[in-house]
C-alpha cells in the first residue's frame, strides 16, 4: 500500500514558494502534513503528481483547510510494503524528485529512518 502526504510550509516560512533550484537541502521537519490519502492501486506515484495538483487546486477534499498546492509544497509517497519514501517538490514547471535532498528525522510521525 502506498499513501501520499501533502506537506506544506507554514505561512511565515522563508522557504515558502521556493523551487528546486533554490533548495539544496530540505528539512522535512519544517513542513506540516496537511493532508493524506491512498494512491490508487496499480498507479505509479510519480505519475500521480499531476492528479494531486488538480485535486489540491480545483477539487479541494473535504477537511483540507490549507492553501492550494503551489511551488515549494512537497508530496511524500510512503510505500508501506517496501518501507521507503519518495519526495516530489511542486516546482515552477512540474515536479522534481528531491528524495536525495531530504534531511531525515526520527520521531513517531516518520517510520522510515535511514
Image (cartoon, rainbow, N blue to C red):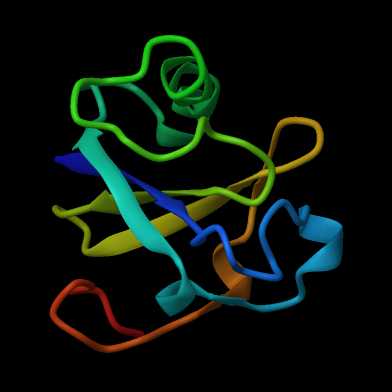
Q: Looking at the picture, how far across and down is residue 54, in whole percent?
A: 50, 15
Residue 92 % position (x, y): 80, 38
Q: Position of residue 2 (x, y in %)?
A: 22, 41
Comparing 112 with 109, the one in front is 109
* Residue at 86% over, 60% down: 21
Nearest to the observer: residue 89 or residue 9: 9
Rendered view: 114 above or below 40: below
What residue is at 49 percent from the left and 55 percent from the top?
Answer: 87
Horizontal and vertical percent position of residue 46 = 50, 34
Q: Please tell me whether residue 49 is drawn above or below residue 21 in the rendered image.
A: above
Q: Give the residue displayed 25% in from the left and 74% down from the top.
A: 112
* Vertical side of 7 occupied by 48: above or below: above
Name which residue lies at 13% across and 80% down.
Answer: 108
16 left or right of 79?
Answer: right
**Quarter of the image with the N terminus in it:** top left
State left or right for residue 43 relative to residue 22: left
Compare residues 30 and 75 and report the one nearer the observer: 30
Viewed as shown, does residue 15 lie left or right of 61?
A: right
Q: Quadrant of the C terminus?
A: bottom left
The outermost residue toward the right is 21
Amino acid at each position: 500500500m502506498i499513501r501520499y502526504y501533502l506537506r506544506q510550509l507554514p505561512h511565515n516560512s522563508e522557504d515558502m514558494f521556493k523551487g528546486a533550484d533554490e533548495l539544496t537541502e530540505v528539512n522535512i521537519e519544517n513542513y506540516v502534513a496537511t493532508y493524506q490519502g491512498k494512491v490508487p492501486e496499480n498507479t505509479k506515484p510519480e505519475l500521480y503528481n499531476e492528479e494531486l495538483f488538480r485535486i489540491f487546486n480545483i477539487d479541494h477534499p473535504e477537511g483540507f483547510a490549507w492553501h492550494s498546492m503551489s511551488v515549494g509544497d512537497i508530496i511524500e509517497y510512503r510505500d508501506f510494503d517496501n518501507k521507503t519514501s519518495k519526495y516530489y517538490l511542486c516546482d515552477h514547471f512540474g515536479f522534481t524528485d528531491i528524495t536525495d535532498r531530504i534531511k531525515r528525522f526520527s520521531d513517531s510521525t516518520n517510520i522510515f529512518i535511514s
